[in-house]
Amino acid sequence: MKKLINILESLEIKPTYERLRIYKYLKEDNKMHPTVNTIYNGVLKDIPTISKTTVYNTLNLFIEKGIIIPIFITGKEERFDIITIPHHHFLCEKCNKIIDIIIKCPYFQKGSVQGHKINEFHAYFKGICKDCLNSENNSDK
């Protein structure tokens, strides 16, 4: 927990218990790209008095400080990713899992596209993940 306290303090974020617990949840479950509700329900068992407003405010502070990024791949809800280096996301249209995809984007590395300066980028792929494809192929046998 001391490491998490140091991270938050280095970003001038007061390390309250609620913030630490939310940050810990994101660090441990970063592969699932949770929603506000998922995060809220995940920390509720440890902090039964936490409000959803506290979760929203904490996530907005984390976004402002650059320790998480919001992603909008589903078109229905905002998800949160603790991996802040530029990367792509793949949404499985069957199981709804969001998978990090590391692909170098030459335009982002160059810093511009057709003369326009790039400050950030978001790239999403949608389709069927390999786990679902394997399940389909195995059920056909």
Image (cartoon, grey):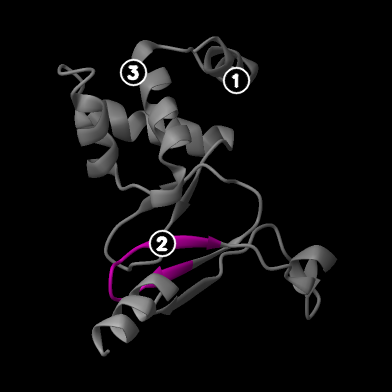
Q: Residue at x 37, y 78 (%)?
A: 134
* Residue denoted by label 1: 7
Q: Is residue 89 above or below residue 51?
A: below
Can residue 85 be seen here? The reply is yes
Rendered residue at 34%/54% (across/down): 78
Q: Position of residue 67 (x, y in %)?
A: 56, 35
Q: Could you tell me residue 42's position as x and y percent?
A: 25, 33
Residue beneath the point at 62% across and 63% down: 121
Q: Is residue 98 magenta?
A: yes
Mark 2 or mark 1, earlier in chain: 1
Q: Which mark is residue 98?
A: 2
x then y, percent, for residue 106? 79, 72
Kind of element beneath mark 2: strand
Residue at 46% across, 31% down: 61
Please determine whether, in this image, residue 107 is positioned above or below residue 5. Answer: below
Query: Where does the magenta region start and end?
Result: 90-100
